[in-house]
Image (cartoon, rainbow, N blue to C red):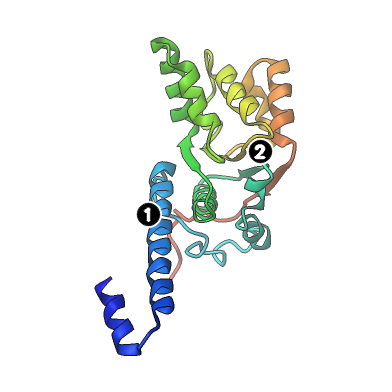
Amino acid sequence: MELRERQASDDNLTNRDFLFHVLNDEVERREAKQLHLRLRRAAFDSQRTIEDFDFTYNPQIPKAKVVDLATCHFVERHENVLLVGPTGVGKSHLAQALGHRACRAGYSVLYIAAHEMLTKLRASRADGSYDRCLAKFASPDLLIIDDLGLRPLENDEPIDLYEVIRQRYERGAMIVTSNRAIEEWPPLFIDELLASAAMERVQHHAHVVVIEGRSFRQPRSA
C-alpha cells in the first residue's frame, strides 16, 4: 500500500487510477495465494513444468500433442490422458507438468502413486473410512495416478481401482502413467468382467500418448 501511495504521489495518479492499482494488487495477491494452495494440495513429488521438459532428448515424444493437452481442455471435458512407455522416458514429469498447468488454470488436482492410492483404500476398509477415502480420489477435477501396473494388484485392489475409475467416469479427468502397454492393463483386474467395465470407462474419451526413446536416467554422452 505504501508503495502505491508513493507511486500515486510521484505520478500524480487520480483517485480512480490509484484505486484500480490497489484493487488489482489485491486480486493478484489472492490468485497467487489460491494457486499456492492448489499446488500444495496437489501433493506433487516435485515441481515439474512443461517449460522445463527437454523434448529434444527424445524426439519421438509427440510434443504437439503434449502442448495441446497443456491447454487443459481435457480437464474441462472430463477426459483421460494415458501416458505409457518404458521407465525413465519422462511420463511422471509430463503427468505432473500437466497437473501443474491444471492448477494454474484454476482446477483442483491430486497426484498419487498407484500403489499408495490402493494402500490407502485398503487401510480405509479396516478403519471404516472407505467412503471418505474413496471420495478423496473421486472429488478433484484432475486425478493423476502414477505408475499403474508397476506391481500386480491383489486382494481387493482391483475392485478399489475400478471404484475410483467408476466414480470419476465423465465427472472428472484422470492422467494415468504406466510402464505397461494399454493391452496389458486388463489382466491387472484379474476378473474379466471387472476388467472390461474398467477399461471401457478408462479408454472412453481418452488421449493415449505413447512415449518411447532413451531414459533420462541414462548417462548422457558428452
Q: What residue is disc 1 on? A: 33
In depth, the one of 34 and 6 nearer the eye is 6
- x and y percentages locating residue 4 in the rendered image: 31, 76
Q: Is residue 34 above or below residue 16?
A: above
Answer few, some or many: residues within 10 Å of disc 1's Cα (few below 14, many 20 plus, some between 14 and 19).
Answer: few
- x and y percentages locating residue 110 in the rendered image: 48, 40
Give the numbered dot on residue 181: 2
Residue occupying the point 62% across, 46% down: 75
- x and y percentages locating residue 102 in the rendered image: 54, 51
| Amino acid type assigned to the residue bearing label 1 in the image | Lys
Quadrant of the rendered image containing residue 11: bottom left
Q: Quadrant of the N terminus?
A: bottom left
User: Looking at the image, which residue sits at the far bottom?
Assistant: 11
Quadrant of the rendered image containing residue 167: top right
| Amino acid type assigned to the residue bearing label 2 in the image | Ala
Residue occupying the point 54% across, 33% down: 139
